[in-house]
Amino acid sequence: MRLARFRSTIFALLAVACVTFLCYRIAHADATIAALALFLTVLFTGANARIFETVVASVAATLCLDYFFIPPVGSITITDPQGWIALVMFLTASLFATHLSTSVRRQRNELISSHRELEKLYALSRSMLLSGGEDVHRLIINKCIELFGFREVALFESATGQIHRSQRDSLIPDEKLQQVSRYGSVEQEEGTGTTVAPINLGNKNLGSLAFREVSLPEATLQALVNTVAVGLAQAHAHEAGTRAEVVRKSEELKSTMIDALAHELKTPLTSMQAAAETLTKPSLSTEQRHDLLEVIQQETEGLKRMLDEAIHLARIDAKKLKLECQPIEVGELIQAVLSSLREQLAPHRIDLQIPSTLPPVLVDKELMVQALKQLLDNAAKYSVERAVISIAVTEANDLLSISVRDRGPGLTEIEQGRVFDKFYRGRYDRSAVQGTGMGLAIAKEITEAHGGFIAVESQVGQGSRFTITLNAATREAIGVAEQPV
Protein backbone atom coordinates (compact mmCIF):
# COMPACT_ATOMS: atom_id res chain seq x y z
CA MET A 1 0.00 0.00 0.00
CA ARG A 2 2.77 2.47 0.94
CA LEU A 3 4.76 1.61 -2.19
CA ALA A 4 1.69 2.21 -4.37
CA ARG A 5 1.06 5.59 -2.72
CA PHE A 6 4.74 6.54 -3.15
CA ARG A 7 4.59 5.68 -6.85
CA SER A 8 1.39 7.70 -7.29
CA THR A 9 2.99 10.72 -5.61
CA ILE A 10 6.07 10.49 -7.81
CA PHE A 11 3.84 10.24 -10.88
CA ALA A 12 1.89 13.36 -9.85
CA LEU A 13 5.08 15.37 -9.27
CA LEU A 14 6.54 14.19 -12.59
CA ALA A 15 3.36 15.24 -14.39
CA VAL A 16 3.59 18.75 -12.90
CA ALA A 17 7.30 18.95 -13.74
CA CYS A 18 6.78 17.88 -17.36
CA VAL A 19 3.99 20.41 -17.96
CA THR A 20 6.09 23.17 -16.36
CA PHE A 21 9.06 22.26 -18.57
CA LEU A 22 6.92 22.30 -21.72
CA CYS A 23 5.37 25.66 -20.89
CA TYR A 24 8.65 27.30 -19.74
CA ARG A 25 11.30 25.94 -22.09
CA ILE A 26 9.44 24.94 -25.25
CA ALA A 27 6.24 26.99 -25.49
CA HIS A 28 7.58 30.04 -23.59
CA ALA A 29 4.04 30.50 -22.28
CA ASP A 30 2.95 33.38 -20.07
CA ALA A 31 1.52 33.02 -16.58
CA THR A 32 -2.08 32.64 -17.77
CA ILE A 33 -1.36 29.81 -20.21
CA ALA A 34 0.87 28.08 -17.68
CA ALA A 35 -1.80 28.38 -14.98
CA LEU A 36 -4.38 26.76 -17.24
CA ALA A 37 -2.00 23.94 -18.22
CA LEU A 38 -1.02 23.25 -14.62
CA PHE A 39 -4.67 23.43 -13.54
CA LEU A 40 -5.60 20.77 -16.13
CA THR A 41 -2.68 18.64 -14.92
CA VAL A 42 -3.99 18.81 -11.35
CA LEU A 43 -7.48 17.85 -12.55
CA PHE A 44 -6.09 14.88 -14.46
CA THR A 45 -4.17 13.78 -11.38
CA GLY A 46 -7.28 14.14 -9.21
CA ALA A 47 -9.30 11.98 -11.59
CA ASN A 48 -6.79 9.09 -11.37
CA ALA A 49 -5.23 9.36 -7.92
CA ARG A 50 -6.19 9.77 -4.28
CA ILE A 51 -6.70 13.01 -2.37
CA PHE A 52 -3.16 12.99 -0.95
CA GLU A 53 -1.54 12.79 -4.38
CA THR A 54 -3.79 15.51 -5.80
CA VAL A 55 -3.03 17.87 -2.88
CA VAL A 56 0.70 17.32 -3.45
CA ALA A 57 0.18 18.02 -7.18
CA SER A 58 -1.79 21.20 -6.39
CA VAL A 59 0.91 22.57 -4.06
CA ALA A 60 3.68 21.64 -6.51
CA ALA A 61 1.79 23.29 -9.40
CA THR A 62 1.33 26.47 -7.31
CA LEU A 63 5.01 26.62 -6.44
CA CYS A 64 6.06 26.04 -10.09
CA LEU A 65 3.68 28.72 -11.30
CA ASP A 66 5.11 31.18 -8.77
CA TYR A 67 8.76 30.28 -9.43
CA PHE A 68 8.75 30.11 -13.25
CA PHE A 69 5.94 32.37 -14.44
CA ILE A 70 5.01 35.07 -11.87
CA PRO A 71 7.46 37.98 -11.46
CA PRO A 72 10.00 38.06 -10.07
CA VAL A 73 10.76 34.84 -12.03
CA GLY A 74 13.25 32.49 -10.38
CA SER A 75 12.09 33.04 -6.81
CA ILE A 76 9.10 32.17 -4.67
CA THR A 77 8.28 35.73 -3.70
CA ILE A 78 5.40 37.77 -4.97
CA THR A 79 5.56 41.56 -4.74
CA ASP A 80 2.29 42.25 -6.50
CA PRO A 81 -0.84 41.60 -4.35
CA GLN A 82 -2.64 40.44 -7.51
CA GLY A 83 -0.09 37.66 -7.80
CA TRP A 84 -1.00 36.45 -4.34
CA ILE A 85 -4.66 36.57 -5.23
CA ALA A 86 -4.00 34.57 -8.41
CA LEU A 87 -1.98 31.94 -6.54
CA VAL A 88 -4.56 31.57 -3.78
CA MET A 89 -7.36 31.27 -6.33
CA PHE A 90 -5.34 28.72 -8.32
CA LEU A 91 -4.64 26.62 -5.23
CA THR A 92 -8.25 26.88 -4.07
CA ALA A 93 -9.63 25.96 -7.49
CA SER A 94 -7.19 23.05 -7.75
CA LEU A 95 -8.13 21.67 -4.34
CA PHE A 96 -11.87 22.13 -5.01
CA ALA A 97 -11.60 20.44 -8.38
CA THR A 98 -9.56 17.68 -6.75
CA HIS A 99 -12.24 17.19 -4.11
CA LEU A 100 -14.95 16.97 -6.78
CA SER A 101 -13.02 14.50 -8.93
CA THR A 102 -12.18 12.38 -5.89
CA SER A 103 -15.83 12.36 -4.84
CA VAL A 104 -16.93 11.38 -8.35
CA ARG A 105 -14.33 8.63 -8.48
CA ARG A 106 -15.40 7.31 -5.08
CA GLN A 107 -19.02 7.21 -6.19
CA ARG A 108 -17.97 5.45 -9.37
CA ASN A 109 -16.04 2.84 -7.37
CA GLU A 110 -19.01 2.38 -5.05
CA LEU A 111 -21.30 1.83 -8.04
CA ILE A 112 -18.88 -0.69 -9.54
CA SER A 113 -18.60 -2.48 -6.19
CA SER A 114 -22.39 -2.46 -5.78
CA HIS A 115 -22.80 -3.85 -9.29
CA ARG A 116 -20.36 -6.66 -8.53
CA GLU A 117 -22.16 -7.50 -5.30
CA LEU A 118 -25.46 -7.61 -7.17
CA GLU A 119 -23.95 -9.98 -9.72
CA LYS A 120 -22.78 -12.26 -6.89
CA LEU A 121 -26.19 -12.22 -5.24
CA TYR A 122 -27.85 -12.94 -8.58
CA ALA A 123 -25.51 -15.90 -9.16
CA LEU A 124 -26.31 -17.23 -5.68
CA SER A 125 -30.08 -16.86 -6.10
CA ARG A 126 -29.98 -18.39 -9.58
CA SER A 127 -28.05 -21.42 -8.30
CA MET A 128 -30.56 -21.96 -5.51
CA LEU A 129 -33.47 -21.57 -7.92
CA LEU A 130 -32.06 -24.18 -10.30
CA SER A 131 -31.12 -26.60 -7.53
CA GLY A 132 -34.70 -27.83 -7.20
CA GLY A 133 -34.35 -27.83 -3.39
CA GLU A 134 -31.76 -30.63 -3.40
CA ASP A 135 -28.95 -30.15 -0.86
CA VAL A 136 -29.51 -26.40 -0.82
CA HIS A 137 -27.47 -26.02 2.39
CA ARG A 138 -24.28 -27.34 0.79
CA LEU A 139 -24.95 -25.24 -2.30
CA ILE A 140 -25.30 -22.04 -0.22
CA ILE A 141 -22.04 -22.71 1.61
CA ASN A 142 -20.06 -23.54 -1.53
CA LYS A 143 -21.44 -20.57 -3.48
CA CYS A 144 -20.74 -18.13 -0.64
CA ILE A 145 -17.11 -19.24 -0.53
CA GLU A 146 -16.80 -19.17 -4.31
CA LEU A 147 -18.46 -15.79 -4.87
CA PHE A 148 -17.49 -13.77 -1.80
CA GLY A 149 -14.15 -15.37 -0.92
CA PHE A 150 -15.07 -16.29 2.66
CA ARG A 151 -12.48 -18.35 4.53
CA GLU A 152 -15.14 -20.38 6.31
CA VAL A 153 -18.93 -20.51 6.25
CA ALA A 154 -21.43 -22.00 8.71
CA LEU A 155 -25.20 -22.20 8.27
CA PHE A 156 -27.59 -22.89 11.16
CA GLU A 157 -31.14 -23.94 10.33
CA SER A 158 -33.56 -23.33 13.19
CA ALA A 159 -36.28 -25.62 11.79
CA THR A 160 -34.12 -28.73 12.15
CA GLY A 161 -31.47 -27.51 14.60
CA GLN A 162 -28.75 -28.64 12.20
CA ILE A 163 -25.51 -26.75 11.57
CA HIS A 164 -23.88 -27.10 8.16
CA ARG A 165 -20.21 -26.14 7.90
CA SER A 166 -17.66 -25.70 5.13
CA GLN A 167 -14.94 -27.44 7.17
CA ARG A 168 -14.67 -29.71 10.17
CA ASP A 169 -12.11 -27.71 12.17
CA SER A 170 -14.33 -24.68 12.62
CA LEU A 171 -13.62 -21.51 14.57
CA ILE A 172 -17.30 -20.55 14.59
CA PRO A 173 -18.94 -21.84 17.80
CA ASP A 174 -22.36 -23.48 17.73
CA GLU A 175 -23.56 -21.30 20.61
CA LYS A 176 -22.89 -18.12 18.66
CA LEU A 177 -24.94 -19.33 15.67
CA GLN A 178 -27.85 -20.33 17.88
CA GLN A 179 -27.67 -17.12 19.91
CA VAL A 180 -27.75 -14.85 16.85
CA SER A 181 -30.61 -16.88 15.38
CA ARG A 182 -32.56 -16.55 18.62
CA TYR A 183 -32.04 -12.83 19.29
CA GLY A 184 -31.79 -11.59 15.69
CA SER A 185 -28.83 -9.19 15.86
CA VAL A 186 -25.64 -9.13 13.80
CA GLU A 187 -22.48 -9.89 15.79
CA GLN A 188 -18.86 -9.46 14.74
CA GLU A 189 -15.67 -10.70 16.42
CA GLU A 190 -12.51 -8.81 15.58
CA GLY A 191 -10.19 -11.52 16.89
CA THR A 192 -11.34 -14.27 14.52
CA GLY A 193 -12.77 -11.94 11.86
CA THR A 194 -16.15 -13.65 12.21
CA THR A 195 -19.48 -12.16 11.21
CA VAL A 196 -22.73 -13.84 12.28
CA ALA A 197 -26.03 -12.59 10.88
CA PRO A 198 -29.62 -13.79 11.46
CA ILE A 199 -31.64 -15.20 8.56
CA ASN A 200 -35.19 -13.90 8.67
CA LEU A 201 -38.00 -13.92 6.15
CA GLY A 202 -40.73 -11.57 7.25
CA ASN A 203 -41.45 -12.40 10.88
CA LYS A 204 -40.19 -15.95 10.56
CA ASN A 205 -36.75 -16.89 11.87
CA LEU A 206 -34.99 -19.42 9.63
CA GLY A 207 -31.54 -19.57 11.25
CA SER A 208 -28.21 -17.74 10.99
CA LEU A 209 -25.27 -17.42 8.62
CA ALA A 210 -21.64 -16.97 9.72
CA PHE A 211 -18.45 -16.35 7.74
CA ARG A 212 -14.85 -15.43 8.43
CA GLU A 213 -12.09 -13.09 7.19
CA VAL A 214 -14.18 -11.01 4.78
CA SER A 215 -16.00 -7.84 5.79
CA LEU A 216 -19.15 -6.91 3.88
CA PRO A 217 -20.96 -3.56 3.85
CA GLU A 218 -24.14 -3.55 5.88
CA ALA A 219 -26.37 -3.33 2.80
CA THR A 220 -24.57 -6.19 1.06
CA LEU A 221 -24.71 -8.32 4.22
CA GLN A 222 -28.44 -7.76 4.54
CA ALA A 223 -28.97 -8.56 0.87
CA LEU A 224 -26.94 -11.76 1.26
CA VAL A 225 -28.93 -13.08 4.23
CA ASN A 226 -32.20 -12.12 2.49
CA THR A 227 -31.15 -14.12 -0.57
CA VAL A 228 -30.22 -17.10 1.62
CA ALA A 229 -33.58 -16.78 3.42
CA VAL A 230 -35.47 -16.99 0.13
CA GLY A 231 -33.41 -20.05 -0.87
CA LEU A 232 -34.12 -21.84 2.41
CA ALA A 233 -37.82 -21.00 2.21
CA GLN A 234 -37.91 -22.35 -1.34
CA ALA A 235 -36.19 -25.56 -0.21
CA HIS A 236 -38.69 -25.98 2.65
CA ALA A 237 -41.61 -25.47 0.27
CA HIS A 238 -40.16 -27.97 -2.20
CA GLU A 239 -39.62 -30.53 0.57
CA ALA A 240 -43.16 -30.07 1.86
CA GLY A 241 -44.50 -30.46 -1.67
CA THR A 242 -42.44 -33.62 -2.17
CA ARG A 243 -43.76 -35.14 1.05
CA ALA A 244 -47.32 -34.32 0.04
CA GLU A 245 -46.74 -35.86 -3.39
CA VAL A 246 -45.30 -39.03 -1.82
CA VAL A 247 -48.33 -39.35 0.44
CA ARG A 248 -50.67 -38.75 -2.49
CA LYS A 249 -48.94 -41.37 -4.66
CA SER A 250 -48.93 -43.84 -1.78
CA GLU A 251 -52.67 -43.41 -1.38
CA GLU A 252 -53.12 -43.81 -5.14
CA LEU A 253 -51.09 -47.03 -5.11
CA LYS A 254 -53.13 -48.40 -2.24
CA SER A 255 -56.37 -47.56 -4.02
CA THR A 256 -55.12 -49.04 -7.30
CA MET A 257 -53.91 -52.19 -5.55
CA ILE A 258 -57.28 -52.68 -3.85
CA ASP A 259 -59.14 -52.12 -7.12
CA ALA A 260 -56.85 -54.52 -8.99
CA LEU A 261 -57.13 -57.25 -6.38
CA ALA A 262 -60.88 -56.80 -6.13
CA HIS A 263 -61.21 -57.12 -9.90
CA GLU A 264 -58.94 -60.16 -10.17
CA LEU A 265 -60.42 -61.90 -7.14
CA LYS A 266 -63.93 -61.60 -8.48
CA THR A 267 -63.48 -64.01 -11.40
CA PRO A 268 -61.89 -66.97 -9.51
CA LEU A 269 -64.27 -66.54 -6.58
CA THR A 270 -67.23 -66.62 -8.95
CA SER A 271 -65.87 -69.80 -10.58
CA MET A 272 -65.25 -71.43 -7.20
CA GLN A 273 -68.73 -70.48 -5.99
CA ALA A 274 -70.35 -71.89 -9.12
CA ALA A 275 -68.31 -75.11 -8.86
CA ALA A 276 -69.15 -75.50 -5.16
CA GLU A 277 -72.88 -74.97 -5.81
CA THR A 278 -72.79 -77.51 -8.64
CA LEU A 279 -71.05 -80.07 -6.40
CA THR A 280 -74.07 -80.04 -4.09
CA LYS A 281 -76.22 -81.58 -6.81
CA PRO A 282 -76.60 -85.37 -6.28
CA SER A 283 -76.96 -86.14 -10.00
CA LEU A 284 -73.27 -85.42 -10.81
CA SER A 285 -71.05 -88.23 -11.96
CA THR A 286 -67.67 -88.97 -10.43
CA GLU A 287 -65.88 -87.52 -13.46
CA GLN A 288 -67.87 -84.29 -13.28
CA ARG A 289 -67.14 -83.95 -9.58
CA HIS A 290 -63.45 -84.47 -10.29
CA ASP A 291 -63.50 -81.76 -12.95
CA LEU A 292 -65.24 -79.31 -10.62
CA LEU A 293 -62.79 -80.03 -7.82
CA GLU A 294 -59.94 -79.47 -10.27
CA VAL A 295 -61.44 -76.06 -11.17
CA ILE A 296 -61.61 -75.15 -7.49
CA GLN A 297 -58.02 -76.28 -6.97
CA GLN A 298 -56.72 -74.29 -9.95
CA GLU A 299 -58.57 -71.14 -8.90
CA THR A 300 -57.29 -71.58 -5.33
CA GLU A 301 -53.72 -71.77 -6.59
CA GLY A 302 -54.32 -68.62 -8.67
CA LEU A 303 -55.63 -66.81 -5.60
CA LYS A 304 -52.65 -67.93 -3.58
CA ARG A 305 -50.30 -66.68 -6.30
CA MET A 306 -51.98 -63.27 -6.34
CA LEU A 307 -51.79 -62.99 -2.56
CA ASP A 308 -48.10 -63.95 -2.65
CA GLU A 309 -47.47 -61.20 -5.20
CA ALA A 310 -49.30 -58.68 -3.04
CA ILE A 311 -47.27 -59.73 0.02
CA HIS A 312 -43.98 -59.47 -1.91
CA LEU A 313 -44.94 -56.03 -3.22
CA ALA A 314 -45.92 -54.88 0.28
CA ARG A 315 -42.55 -56.04 1.64
CA ILE A 316 -40.75 -54.20 -1.14
CA ASP A 317 -42.70 -50.97 -0.57
CA ALA A 318 -42.04 -51.18 3.16
CA LYS A 319 -38.30 -51.67 2.51
CA LYS A 320 -38.43 -54.98 4.40
CA LEU A 321 -36.86 -57.03 1.62
CA LYS A 322 -33.99 -58.94 3.26
CA LEU A 323 -31.66 -60.99 1.09
CA GLU A 324 -30.20 -64.32 2.19
CA CYS A 325 -27.75 -64.81 -0.66
CA GLN A 326 -25.86 -67.96 -1.53
CA PRO A 327 -24.04 -69.16 -4.68
CA ILE A 328 -26.58 -70.84 -6.98
CA GLU A 329 -26.13 -72.35 -10.43
CA VAL A 330 -28.29 -70.59 -12.98
CA GLY A 331 -29.54 -73.91 -14.33
CA GLU A 332 -30.77 -74.83 -10.85
CA LEU A 333 -32.70 -71.56 -10.61
CA ILE A 334 -34.37 -72.11 -13.97
CA GLN A 335 -35.29 -75.71 -13.19
CA ALA A 336 -36.91 -74.56 -9.93
CA VAL A 337 -38.96 -72.02 -11.89
CA LEU A 338 -40.00 -74.57 -14.53
CA SER A 339 -41.11 -77.02 -11.84
CA SER A 340 -43.27 -74.45 -10.06
CA LEU A 341 -44.92 -73.35 -13.34
CA ARG A 342 -45.37 -76.80 -14.86
CA GLU A 343 -49.11 -76.44 -15.42
CA GLN A 344 -48.95 -72.90 -16.83
CA LEU A 345 -46.15 -73.84 -19.23
CA ALA A 346 -47.67 -77.18 -20.28
CA PRO A 347 -49.43 -75.77 -23.40
CA HIS A 348 -46.16 -74.33 -24.71
CA ARG A 349 -42.80 -75.56 -25.93
CA ILE A 350 -39.77 -74.53 -23.90
CA ASP A 351 -36.46 -73.92 -25.64
CA LEU A 352 -33.54 -73.92 -23.17
CA GLN A 353 -30.16 -72.46 -24.12
CA ILE A 354 -28.00 -72.78 -21.00
CA PRO A 355 -24.23 -73.31 -21.45
CA SER A 356 -22.70 -75.86 -19.11
CA THR A 357 -19.69 -73.73 -18.13
CA LEU A 358 -21.41 -70.83 -16.42
CA PRO A 359 -20.29 -69.44 -13.06
CA PRO A 360 -22.86 -69.36 -10.26
CA VAL A 361 -24.67 -66.23 -9.13
CA LEU A 362 -24.85 -65.00 -5.53
CA VAL A 363 -28.59 -64.52 -4.96
CA ASP A 364 -31.46 -65.15 -2.58
CA LYS A 365 -32.82 -68.30 -4.20
CA GLU A 366 -36.45 -67.88 -3.13
CA LEU A 367 -36.65 -64.26 -4.27
CA MET A 368 -34.81 -64.79 -7.55
CA VAL A 369 -37.02 -67.77 -8.38
CA GLN A 370 -39.98 -65.48 -7.72
CA ALA A 371 -38.56 -62.85 -10.12
CA LEU A 372 -37.94 -65.39 -12.90
CA LYS A 373 -41.39 -66.88 -12.35
CA GLN A 374 -42.89 -63.49 -13.16
CA LEU A 375 -41.09 -63.43 -16.53
CA LEU A 376 -42.05 -67.00 -17.48
CA ASP A 377 -45.63 -66.63 -16.22
CA ASN A 378 -45.91 -63.42 -18.23
CA ALA A 379 -44.57 -65.18 -21.36
CA ALA A 380 -47.05 -68.06 -20.91
CA LYS A 381 -50.01 -65.67 -20.58
CA TYR A 382 -49.22 -63.76 -23.77
CA SER A 383 -48.11 -66.65 -25.99
CA VAL A 384 -50.59 -68.64 -28.05
CA GLU A 385 -50.90 -72.39 -27.46
CA ARG A 386 -47.89 -74.48 -28.67
CA ALA A 387 -45.82 -71.32 -29.12
CA VAL A 388 -42.12 -71.52 -28.30
CA ILE A 389 -40.88 -69.78 -25.14
CA SER A 390 -37.11 -69.38 -25.26
CA ILE A 391 -34.93 -69.24 -22.14
CA ALA A 392 -31.32 -68.28 -22.84
CA VAL A 393 -28.39 -67.54 -20.52
CA THR A 394 -25.28 -65.68 -21.67
CA GLU A 395 -22.12 -64.47 -19.92
CA ALA A 396 -20.06 -61.36 -20.66
CA ASN A 397 -17.72 -59.26 -18.50
CA ASP A 398 -18.60 -61.12 -15.28
CA LEU A 399 -22.30 -60.56 -15.92
CA LEU A 400 -24.91 -63.28 -16.42
CA SER A 401 -27.99 -62.42 -18.48
CA ILE A 402 -31.12 -64.58 -18.26
CA SER A 403 -33.52 -63.88 -21.13
CA VAL A 404 -37.10 -65.04 -21.58
CA ARG A 405 -38.56 -64.56 -25.06
CA ASP A 406 -42.21 -65.04 -25.93
CA ARG A 407 -44.13 -64.98 -29.22
CA GLY A 408 -46.90 -62.72 -27.97
CA PRO A 409 -48.40 -59.52 -29.41
CA GLY A 410 -45.38 -57.39 -28.41
CA LEU A 411 -45.24 -53.96 -26.83
CA THR A 412 -45.31 -50.45 -28.22
CA GLU A 413 -42.57 -47.99 -27.25
CA ILE A 414 -44.89 -46.32 -24.75
CA GLU A 415 -45.74 -49.68 -23.17
CA GLN A 416 -42.06 -50.62 -22.95
CA GLY A 417 -41.44 -47.46 -20.93
CA ARG A 418 -44.19 -48.28 -18.43
CA VAL A 419 -44.27 -52.08 -18.35
CA PHE A 420 -42.31 -52.24 -15.06
CA ASP A 421 -44.57 -49.73 -13.29
CA LYS A 422 -46.70 -51.04 -10.47
CA PHE A 423 -50.21 -52.09 -11.51
CA TYR A 424 -49.63 -51.09 -15.14
CA ARG A 425 -51.37 -53.30 -17.68
CA GLY A 426 -51.04 -53.03 -21.44
CA ARG A 427 -53.62 -52.63 -24.13
CA TYR A 428 -54.50 -56.37 -24.27
CA ASP A 429 -54.37 -57.09 -20.56
CA ARG A 430 -57.71 -56.08 -19.16
CA SER A 431 -59.85 -58.00 -21.60
CA ALA A 432 -57.73 -60.99 -22.64
CA VAL A 433 -55.26 -61.75 -19.85
CA GLN A 434 -55.77 -62.07 -16.12
CA GLY A 435 -53.35 -60.31 -13.80
CA THR A 436 -52.88 -57.44 -11.38
CA GLY A 437 -49.96 -55.69 -13.05
CA MET A 438 -47.69 -56.47 -10.08
CA GLY A 439 -45.52 -59.24 -11.54
CA LEU A 440 -42.97 -57.29 -13.58
CA ALA A 441 -42.74 -54.60 -10.90
CA ILE A 442 -41.85 -57.32 -8.38
CA ALA A 443 -39.26 -58.80 -10.75
CA LYS A 444 -37.67 -55.36 -11.22
CA GLU A 445 -37.47 -54.62 -7.49
CA ILE A 446 -36.00 -58.04 -6.66
CA THR A 447 -33.43 -57.78 -9.45
CA GLU A 448 -32.31 -54.29 -8.41
CA ALA A 449 -32.10 -55.40 -4.78
CA HIS A 450 -29.46 -57.92 -5.97
CA GLY A 451 -27.49 -55.17 -7.72
CA GLY A 452 -28.70 -56.21 -11.18
CA PHE A 453 -31.04 -54.70 -13.72
CA ILE A 454 -33.94 -55.79 -15.92
CA ALA A 455 -34.70 -54.71 -19.48
CA VAL A 456 -37.22 -55.37 -22.23
CA GLU A 457 -36.91 -55.57 -26.02
CA SER A 458 -40.08 -55.82 -28.04
CA GLN A 459 -41.69 -55.25 -31.41
CA VAL A 460 -45.41 -55.16 -32.02
CA GLY A 461 -46.53 -58.44 -33.55
CA GLN A 462 -43.19 -60.21 -32.94
CA GLY A 463 -43.17 -60.83 -29.20
CA SER A 464 -41.03 -59.57 -26.34
CA ARG A 465 -37.79 -60.52 -24.64
CA PHE A 466 -37.25 -59.73 -20.96
CA THR A 467 -33.71 -59.97 -19.64
CA ILE A 468 -32.46 -60.06 -16.05
CA THR A 469 -28.75 -59.31 -15.72
CA LEU A 470 -26.87 -60.26 -12.54
CA ASN A 471 -23.28 -60.15 -11.35
CA ALA A 472 -21.49 -63.49 -11.46
CA ALA A 473 -20.39 -64.68 -8.02
CA THR A 474 -16.71 -64.09 -7.29
CA ARG A 475 -14.53 -66.76 -5.72
CA GLU A 476 -14.25 -64.70 -2.54
CA ALA A 477 -18.02 -64.38 -2.28
CA ILE A 478 -18.48 -68.12 -2.87
CA GLY A 479 -15.92 -68.91 -0.19
CA VAL A 480 -17.58 -66.67 2.35
CA ALA A 481 -21.03 -68.05 1.56
CA GLU A 482 -19.87 -71.67 1.88
CA GLN A 483 -18.19 -71.21 5.24
CA PRO A 484 -20.08 -72.99 8.05
CA VAL A 485 -21.96 -70.71 10.41
Image (cartoon, rainbow, N blue to C red):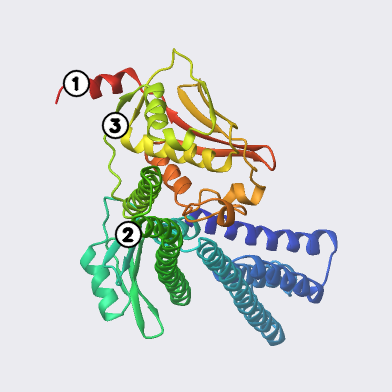
Residue at position x 45%, y 58% in the image: 267
Mark 1 highlights which residue? 483
Mark 2 highlights which residue? 164
Q: Residues within 10 Å of mark 2 (few under 14, many from 20)?
A: some
Residue 461, position as x, y percentages in the image: 70, 41
Whether residue 385 appears in this view of the structure is yes
Where is 356 relative to 466, above or below?
above
Which secondary structure lies at badge 2? strand
Residue at position x 69%, y 60% in the image: 15
Residues 150 and 205: in front is 205
**Which image quadrant is residue 33 in?**
bottom right
Give whichever of discs 3 and 2 has the lower sequence position: 2
**Label 3 to label 1: alpha-carbon separation:** 13 Å
Whether residue 364 appears in this view of the structure is no
Residue 398, position as x, y percentages in the image: 45, 22
Mark 3 highlights which residue? 325
- The reply, left or right, for residue 454 in relation to residue 340 is right
**Which image quadrant is residue 262 in?**
bottom left
Where is 419 relative to 70, above or below?
above
Give whichever of discs 3 and 1 has the lower sequence position: 3
The residue under label 3 is which amino acid type? Cys
Residue at position x 64%, y 45% in the image: 411
Kindly give the residue lying farthest to the top in the view shown.
357
